[in-house]
Amino acid sequence: MYSLTVSDHIMIAHSFKGAIFGPAQKVHGATFVVEWEIRRASLDAHGLIADIGLMRQALRATLDAIDYRNLDDDPALAGVNTTSEFLAGFLFERLKARVRDGALGAGVAGALAAMKVTLRESPVAWAAFEGPLA
Amino acid sequence: MYSLTVSDHIMIAHSFKGAIFGPAQKVHGATFVVEWEIRRASLDAHGLIADIGLMRQALRATLDAIDYRNLDDDPALAGVNTTSEFLAGFLFERLKARVRDGALGAGVAGALAAMKVTLRESPVAWAAFEGPLA
Amino acid sequence: MYSLTVSDHIMIAHSFKGAIFGPAQKVHGATFVVEWEIRRASLDAHGLIADIGLMRQALRATLDAIDYRNLDDDPALAGVNTTSEFLAGFLFERLKARVRDGALGAGVAGALAAMKVTLRESPVAWAAFEGPLA
Amino acid sequence: MYSLTVSDHIMIAHSFKGAIFGPAQKVHGATFVVEWEIRRASLDAHGLIADIGLMRQALRATLDAIDYRNLDDDPALAGVNTTSEFLAGFLFERLKARVRDGALGAGVAGALAAMKVTLRESPVAWAAFEGPLA
Amino acid sequence: MYSLTVSDHIMIAHSFKGAIFGPAQKVHGATFVVEWEIRRASLDAHGLIADIGLMRQALRATLDAIDYRNLDDDPALAGVNTTSEFLAGFLFERLKARVRDGALGAGVAGALAAMKVTLRESPVAWAAFEGPLA
Amino acid sequence: MYSLTVSDHIMIAHSFKGAIFGPAQKVHGATFVVEWEIRRASLDAHGLIADIGLMRQALRATLDAIDYRNLDDDPALAGVNTTSEFLAGFLFERLKARVRDGALGAGVAGALAAMKVTLRESPVAWAAFEGPLA
């Protein structure tokens, strides 16, 4: 199985609801380094899993929707705790939708086996979501 | 599948028995950066895999038992070569026991699917052990 | 000249005033990896610049005052843009005061020649402030 | 499952054929950080997956065949686009052949379950190939 | 003294003339991670050394002139060995010219004390050039 | 001023004398990533500060004298605490002697202005020594 990963980052504010979160119940923030991996059983005729330029554009466009914001104010995220693991799953779904809409070119969506999205929140903590693409 | 990873480090001495180890048969040492990943199919009501603060405490407590020591002198490690891959498996078992004892909260142990422990011994070498939690 | 550096991190929210900041005028956030370097011309009788444990405690205590907060709400930071470079200078002054108050032990403040504080805000941007300690 | 990874790097030139590659159709280059992971269900009598010294030698020898070259001029790579994902698969096959030829010692090839080769081409992009060893 | 650094990267091919270069006499390549640091004694009214967005644009524009190329074919680099240290000095001069031309805004060029350009060619080697701006 | 840095690593054991060291009074260990920087005002006729291959050999040879050892047993280090900052100074002197003995080629020693040696002991702590070469 082949895989290809691109990385970018966002700088967001948010707060969490629930005593379990301690000081993170207050509005604070994070730089999330976001890694997006796609997997494919065989390469295309160009020797590619996908066009890395299109991948970087699709990741950037997906991140632009939440970058430089207080996620507490985003209607699409109302009523949820935007933990790193939640956001990994959330970005996975948005990236999957983009891929299906042809963001990586016709035919790529059908060729991909799986994807993984990783969010690094600090040098000592990161979360991920991975799943099949079918 | 969701995953969450925390990282910490230890600074230990040890030596290995067997000609295959060459210069590492002498007492030497390592800074091991230890990464502990837990995996869970779905998030809890807070949007969490587990409380990251409890994870960091459980990892720190597990590492404290061997940190700042010559592992050659640890009765729990007598008669084994404490290679990076061995220690990855050893720490996996100790962390699994802590999780089962409730270190990450009631109910978390039953919800986790698998774990992985990685030890980075230098910029050019690292080892890991992963397995199911059931 | 010898130097010794310790590192820690904070996760804060803030916003900036001024059209030059573009999208960063909205409340957003950052994980700042904070590196604190101290410099000394010669080592003490123990072979140390300073006790690294005390250094890590002093850095942690300094960061606790702003960690997990929206800096826009901190009276000590009212009316300023808490850019990375500003915060580097701000933390430099707070750490200098701690050193002078004996946080690294008696005699260390007088022995140090200079300090540097670096804040890494993303994989592609960081700021620092350095200056003499006298 | 245990795993052990070693890392090294190469500095090569190459060019790609196909409009999809844009500016990368011209001769350009890359520093590839190459990570080679091997997986094994249980450790040997020494507490090892394999001799890490032999692993580093086998990786170095495999990389020497393409390091400090323009890959466009390598007959073994004629007619293909030497993308990061292609090279990951290519190096996987060469390393698998070395393992089977005993580069990690007699008996190791039969004990390994799988391998993964990762090529990091920049701080924001990397590719990998993984597969079973049988 | 305050400092602010931004980072980007290029992927180039080149070759060196002279027996001292050994295998690097052949056409090979590199991913250079390029870090550009500017230094300023005091912050402007916004709390800035310079607009980080303008800095990233100026660095990108400077790098575009040599990115994805075989430097052996660049007339501006004819007859020189484009070593990492040479390129650090070369990019320093080009960035200095941009700053003087107002790329970071009016008034910034006069306010900067010094700059440093670092090129990381591999995990184990990097070069830099630093100098005053006056 | 130009600079060139190469990096390597060692894996050593040691212990410290003095209550200030707490748990580090016991035999423990470290992986030290060692960075050696040399500085030169202008490049030689090849466009070099020094031959990077010779630099890596000189660093490796210098590190071999202490690598894979318990430093407590090294007569050259008897009676001193081999802290990171001490070792930075110690390796600086050994590297300076090698440079003077021609390890980087005739003429290089006289051309270098200064050097810096950095030892990274963990992701959150490092020490350095820098000084002129004359």
Image (cartoon, coloured by chain):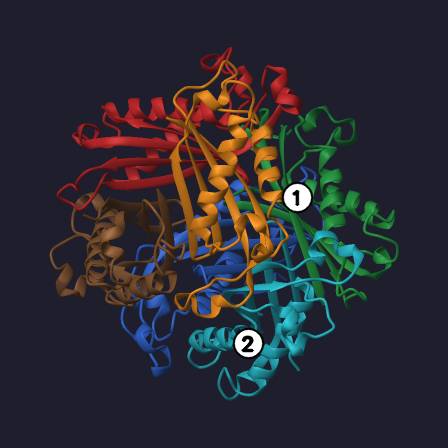
Chain colours: A orange, B brown, C cyan, D red, E green, F blue
Q: Is residue E88 above or below residue A26?
A: above
* Location of mark 2 (residue): C65
Say which mark, if any, is on residue C63.
none
Could you say whether the residue bearing mark 1 is in a helix, strand or loop?
helix
Towards the viewer: E3 or A52: A52
Residues under labels 2 and 1: Cα distance? 42 Å
> Residue at (33%, 78%) from the top-left corner?
F22
Residue under mark 1: which chain is it in? Answer: E
Q: Position of residue D119 (x, y in %)?
A: 46, 33
Estimate the x, y position of residue D13 in percent, counting from the top left. 57, 25
Q: Nearer the viewer, residue E120 or C25?
A: C25
User: Image height check: is F42 above or below A41?
Assistant: below
User: Where is E101 relative to D20, above or below?
Assistant: below
Q: Mark 2 belongs to which amino acid?
A: Ala
From the image, tell me which residue sits under label 1. E85
Residue at 64% of width from left, 54% of height from top?
A: F39
Using the image as rendered, state which of residue B37 and residue B83 is in the foreground. Answer: B37
Quarter of the image with the N terminus of chain E in it: bottom right
Q: Residue at x 11, y 56 (%)?
A: B79
Residue B42 placement, left or right of A72: left
Q: Quadrant of residue D102?
A: top left
**Mark 2 residue crowding within 10 angstroms, few (<14) / some (14–19) / many (20+):** few
Residue depicted at x 45% and y 14%: D76
The x, y position of residue E51, in whole percent, is 76, 54
Tell me which amino acid carries mark 1.
Glu
Disc 1 crowd rating (10 Å Cα; few below 14, some 14-19, many 20+) is many
Do marks 2 and 1 both belong to one polypeptide chain?
A: no
